Image (cartoon, helix red, strand yellow):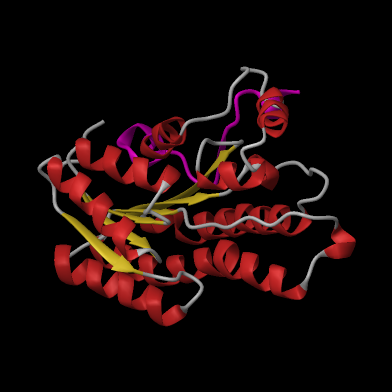
Amino acid sequence: MNFSGKVVLVTGGTSGIGKDTAIAFAKQGANVVVAGRREAEGHAVVAEIEKTGQKGLFVKTDVSQEGDVKNLIEKTVEKFGRLDIAFNNAGVESAGPVTEFQVKDYEHVFGINVLGVLLSQKYEIPVMLKQGGGVIINTTSVLGHVGMPNVSVYTGSKFAVEGITKVTALEYAAAGIRVNTVAPAVTQTEMFDRVSGGNADNIAAMTAMHPMGRVATPMDIAGAVMFLASDAASFVTGISIPVDGGILAR
């Protein structure tokens, strides 16, 4: 895949799926903007991007804050003059029985996972409209397709983003903006480490969920994102690609 001359934005780009995807886009010729809340990690990702010979930019951003998102898009256009591909990947998790969730948990998870996507699209789309088109990929989850006990708030947030993506795809299909989601299963990231607690039994149980017998790597997800961003997917909009090792085939 060749993304030469393209400008890519990755939210949640300081680690895991976002980090690996940002670097992968740079290796295929794109200039990449990395957004996240952790400055040291963000600048480290930009350093990796620049090792490929491409340009990078880190913008400290909390996607649940409208001012931060507006500033992110303004900085992107100021630096690169355009925005071709946006990977709205920032997300957080929450677990526990539905009877035990706290309102603050809902506000935190929905603020980043749902409002963060809405705000990102709100400011990305006008830039893409002015230049005649673009691509948006939102990160959801297999839990945006099926339920699982003890993750009601997280699952609800991912179902919401699946719906928002379909609506946005319909609203802007005729304007040349494609909007899709990538829906990972368990992926080897910091979130995986937090959820598993490093416990061997937990890791084994999470691995066993996948018919392929392993969890995903961040690059497994990056490959699907890059396909959706590429000209190979030029007639693809409003869909979700599960990258789940076969979970949803059961």
Quick one: which residue is furthest to the bottom in this view? Answer: 67
Which residue is found at the position 25% from the left and 58% from the top?
43
Instruction: Report the quarter where the N terminus lies.
Output: top left
Q: Position of residue 161 (x, y in %)?
A: 60, 57
Left or right: where 95 falls relative to 64: right
Quick one: which residue is furthest to the top in this view? Answer: 212
Q: Quadrant of residue 53?
A: top left
Magenta stretch: includes residue 136:
no
Q: Position of residue 246 (x, y in %)?
A: 65, 23
Number of labels in the image equals 0
Left or right: where 205 falls relative to 23: right
Instruction: Report the quarter where the C terminus lies.
Output: top right
- Between residue 103 and residue 171, name the one nearer to us: 103
User: Does 221 appear above or below 39?
Assistant: above
Quick one: which residue is furthest to the front in this view? Answer: 199
Which residue is found at the position 23% from the left and 72% from the top?
75
Left or right: where 24 falls relative to 29: right
Q: Position of residue 206 (x, y in %)?
A: 68, 31
Magenta stretch: includes residue 234:
yes
Bounds of the magenta segment: 227-250
- Between residue 5 and residue 54, name the one nearer to us: 54
Q: Quadrant of residue 113?
A: bottom right
Quick one: which residue is furthest to the left in this view? Answer: 53
Q: Let me know if residue 133 appears in the view.
A: no
Which residue is found at the position 46% from the left and 69% from the top?
63
Left or right: where 234 falls relative to 196: left
Q: Position of residue 168 (x, y in %)?
A: 52, 60
User: Does 122 appear above or below 210?
Assistant: below
Q: Let me know if residue 46 appears in the view.
A: yes
Which residue is found at the position 17% from the left and 72% from the top?
78
